[in-house]
Image (spheres, rainbow, N blue to C red):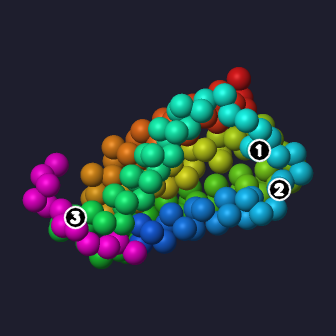
């Protein structure tokens, strides 16, 4: 990765992806689910803190670091994967609000948004964002697995 290939700018698509993925979270903040296990106290507080920091760094990196060699955003296999991950994430939220709280739902809520960010980052050739996304993904999975699966 060569830093000279990047410029400071603003990638509206990175911000839009983040906001789209956050829509169910905004709803959840206001309208609790029937069997809302996600509102319990976390046993992975330190990992959650690291995840929160990496999430902020991820959004910043997605939005302000622009690879000079990236193309205009158009439908590619990676963007299709982003869309599929977002849809599976929304389906997981629908299942969660339908009272389905199992390993598949929890993994859907934790892994699909991370995959969407990862695929988007690779498509946009924003390798700077790979580090915070990778750390966020690991922490988010640990949170989901330790708090709700094991």
Give the image quarter of residue 126. bottom left
* Element type at mark 3: strand
Image coords of residue 20 (percent x, y): 57, 68
Residue located beneath label 3 in the image? 67
Q: Earlier in the sequence, mark 1 or mark 3?
A: 1
Q: Which is closer to the viewer, label 3 or label 2?
A: 2
CB atoms at circles 2 and 1 under 8 Å apart? Answer: yes
Q: Which residue is mark 2?
A: 32
Q: Is residue 116 rendered to the left or right of residue 10? A: right
Which residue is pictured at 48% across the width and 71% down the height? 16
Judged left or right of residue 80, residue 6 is: left
Q: Residue at x 54, y 68 (%)?
A: 19
**Residue drawn at (68%, 64%), measured in percent from left and top?**
26
User: In whole angstroms, how far apart are the C-alphas of marks 3 and 2?
Assistant: 40 Å
Residue toward you, 41 or 88: 41
Where residue 9 sits, quadrant-wise, is bottom left
Do callouts 1 and 3 mark residues in contact (Cβ within 8 Å)?
A: no
| Tag shown at residue 39 | 1
| Neighbourhood count class around disc 3 (C-alpha, 10 Å): few under 14, some 14–19, many 20 upward | many
Q: Does residue 140 sit above or below 25 in this rendering? A: above
Q: In which quadrant of the rendered image does the C terminus lie?
A: top right
Taking the view exactly as shown, the residue that stands out farthest to the top is 150
Relative depth, front residue between 52 and 36: 52
Q: Which residues are magenta?
A: 1-12
How far apart are labels 1 and 3 at the CA level? Answer: 38 Å
Q: Residues within 10 Å of mark 1 (few under 14, many from 20)?
A: few
Q: Secondary structure at mark 1?
A: helix
């Amino acid at each position: 990765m060569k830093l000279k290939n990047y410029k400071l700018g603003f990638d509206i698509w990175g911000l839009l992806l983040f906001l789209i993925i956050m829509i169910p979270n905004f709803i959840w903040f206001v309208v609790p689910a029937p069997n809302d296990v996600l509102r319990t106290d976390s046993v992975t507080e330190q990992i959650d803190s690291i995840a929160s920091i990496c999430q902020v760094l991820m959004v910043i990196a997605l939005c302000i670091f622009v690879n000079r060699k990236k193309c205009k955003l158009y439908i590619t296999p990676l963007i299709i994967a982003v869309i599929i991950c977002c849809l599976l994430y929304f389906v997981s939220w629908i299942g969660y609000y339908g009272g389905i709280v199992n390993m598949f739902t929890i993994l859907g809520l934790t892994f699909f948004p991370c995959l969407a960010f990862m695929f988007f980052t690779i498509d946009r050739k924003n390798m700077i964002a790979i580090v915070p996304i990778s750390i966020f993904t690991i922490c988010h999975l640990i949170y989901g697995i330790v708090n709700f699966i094991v």
